[in-house]
Image (cartoon, rainbow, N blue to C red):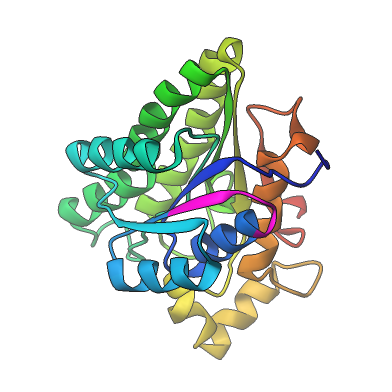
């Protein structure tokens, strides 16, 4: 097996219909994996799975619903027979000042970004423990290490939680040979960042905090995820890898 290939493995990607999740699902398939794409946007997920090929399949899944997650992961197990890789990519943001964000908005962001990451990881780990190991890669953010540039308290809190949840699960499941890591992107052009990339003044402020002078594309984040899921990272667990064009070095 080559270091950056995962032939014969089965990967689950949440939030897989768009953006980073979609780029990741495609790259994992190119690396040899069978891929289960989970997303609320069932039509887009099914279209993406059809485009990826016969080793991909899609499920409509609200990853904040314990019952639905349990059902979908059972169906994935029945379809593919095992589970080797989980990528927790589903996420949301509400960019408002802390004095204006509602508790419903706060809870929605925390439930998806942090709660669903824990829920899917727990269900996946049960399957991985039975087969002797696996790899989980979470989507954190540079906002998990930084107070950020713009008001975004719920997102920043949730991603800080993802960073430490990654460490906690890595230690808890190390004996079962389940590696748990995360990536921490900077601003990437996805549906979550439309307000930033469509406003020249806001984008200029972001670029002022980007030493390399170029922001990553979804494929750059997917490449880091593949690395952490692959044999090349077999001795790496509990880390959060920034893909941030130098943001956190400032």
Query: Looking at the image, which residue is at 61% across and 67% down?
Result: 218
Q: In this orientation, does residue 149 appear?
A: no
Of residue 166 and residue 58, the one placed in the foreground of this image is 58
Query: Looking at the image, which residue is at 48% across and 33% down?
Result: 82
Q: Is residue 177 left or right of residue 125?
A: right
Percent of width and height locating residue 84 = 55, 34
Q: Is residue 96 left or right of residue 55?
A: left
Query: Looking at the image, which residue is at 51% across and 73% down?
Result: 51
Q: Is residue 32 magenta?
A: yes
The quadrant holding residue 114 is top left
- Count all numbered tags in the image, as a single digit: 0
Q: In this orientation, does residue 129 appear?
A: yes
Q: Is residue 183 magenta?
A: no
Q: Is residue 235 left or right of residue 21?
A: right
The quadrant holding residue 76 is top left
Percent of width and height locating residue 240 = 64, 39
Of residue 33 and residue 90, the one placed in the foreground of this image is 33
Q: In which quadrant of the rendered image does the N terminus lie?
A: top right
Taking the view exactly as shown, the residue that stands out farthest to the top is 175
The quadrant holding residue 2 is top right
Of residue 148 and residue 38, the one placed in the foreground of this image is 38
Above or below, 120 relative to 113? above
Percent of width and height locating residue 234 = 75, 28
Of residue 64 and residue 128, the one placed in the foreground of this image is 128
Q: Which residues are magenta?
A: 30-36
């Amino acid at each position: 097996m080559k270091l950056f290939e995962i032939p014969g493995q089965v990967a689950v990607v949440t939030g897989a219909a768009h953006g980073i999740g979609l780029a990741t699902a495609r790259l994992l398939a190119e690396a040899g994996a069978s891929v289960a794409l989970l997303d609320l946007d069932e039509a887009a997920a099914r279209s993406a799975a059809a485009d990826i090929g016969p080793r991909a399949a899609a499920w409509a899944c609200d990853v904040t619903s314990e019952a639905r997650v349990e059902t979908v992961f059972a169906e994935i197990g029945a379809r593919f027979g095992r589970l080797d890789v989980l990528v927790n990519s589903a996420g949301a943001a509400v960019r408002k000042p802390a004095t204006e964000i509602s508790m419903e908005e706060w809870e929605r962001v925390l439930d998806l970004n942090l709660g669903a990451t824990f829920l899917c990881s727990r269900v996946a780990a049960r399957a991985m423990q039975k087969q002797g190991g696996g790899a989980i890669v979470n989507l954190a953010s540079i906002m998990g290490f930084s107070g950020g540039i713009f008001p975004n308290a719920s997102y920043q809190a949730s991603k800080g939680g993802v960073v430490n949840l990654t460490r906690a699960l890595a230690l808890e499941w190390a004996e079962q040979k389940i590696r748990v890591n995360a990536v921490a992107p900077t601003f990437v052009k996805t549906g979550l960042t439309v307000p930033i990339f469509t406003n020249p003044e806001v984008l200029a402020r972001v670029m002022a905090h980007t030493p390399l002078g170029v922001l990553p594309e979804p494929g750059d984040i997917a490449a880091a995820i593949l690395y952490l899921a692959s044999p090349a990272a077999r001795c790496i667990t509990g880390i959060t890898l920034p893909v941030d064009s130098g943001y956190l070095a400032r």
